[in-house]
Amino acid sequence: MNDLLHILLYIQIGLCVFCLYRIIRGPSIADRMVGIDIFGILVVGICAILSIITGKTFIIDIGIAWIILSFIGTLTLAKYLGGKSLNE
Amino acid sequence: METVSVILIIIGILFNLFGCIGLVRLPDVYNRLQSATKCVTLGTCSILLGVLFYFGFIDIGVKALVAIPILFFAATVAAHALVKGAYKFGVPLGDKSVKDDYKEEEK
């Protein structure tokens, strides 16, 4: 069972390569931001699988904090794209 | 219970895989955002549900259950703001797009 979980963890880490491809190759700035947004959600899945493997509680706290940080970062960049200043 | 949790995690990783393939293969920033956000959000929620089934209702499982609604709200709101910002920035639609409802509403 533990070996299967390790294999699933490596598959989930390997999915981040797709996001990195989109971040590097993206034709416009919006494509790069989509890649960063999806990368942030994938990291939460990595944290969830790691918390099963190691059995430690704090790793899922890192996941929750990562969701909120990714949310704030994406909203800020989206406001920058829309042409507004940040206090508007 | 461990078997159910591993099955849920496998389903979640399959959804993540389909979302990431869409992120690479689709032709347009709007298509990419739609495919990737929907599939990856649902897949990650399935993985977190697998954590809940693995541990039961102790602290770590309840934290995974709390993370699910936060993830739903945060990911969908961020994607909506991002696609609106991209449209205002002037990212063009793909070649095969046939209809632009937002442009007709602006007139």
Image (spheres, rainbow, N blue to C red):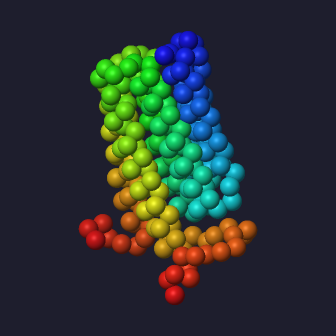
Tell which of A59 and A86 is nearer to you: A59
- What is the quadrant of the N terminus of chain A in the image? top right
Q: Is residue A81 visible?
A: yes
Question: Residue at point 44% right, 19% down?
Answer: B54
* Residue A8 versus residue A20 in the image, above or below: above
Q: Position of residue A34 (x, y in %)?
A: 52, 54
Furthest residue in direction left, as rendered: A87
Tell which of A83 and B84 is nearer to you: B84
Q: Position of residue A2 (x, y in %)?
A: 53, 12
Q: Position of residue A45 (x, y in %)?
A: 48, 33
Task: From the viewer's perspective, tell me whether residue B106 is left or right of residue A69.
Answer: right
Q: Position of residue A41 (x, y in %)?
A: 47, 42
- What is the quadrant of the C terminus of chain A in the image? bottom left
Residue A26 picture quarter = bottom right
The number of numbered badges drawn on the structure is: 0
Question: Residue at point 50% right, 15% down?
Answer: B2
Task: From the viewer's perspective, tell me whether residue A36 is left or right of residue A18.
Answer: left
Task: From the viewer's perspective, tell me whether residue B85 is left or right of residue A69.
Answer: right
Furthest residue in direction bottom, as rendered: B107
Tell which of B97 and A36 is nearer to you: B97
Q: Is residue A24 visible?
A: no
Question: Residue at point 56% right, 34% down?
Answer: B12
* Residue B40 versus residue B61 in the image, above or below: below
Question: Residue at point 62% right, 50% down?
Answer: B23
* Residue B71 versus residue A11 in the image, above or below: below
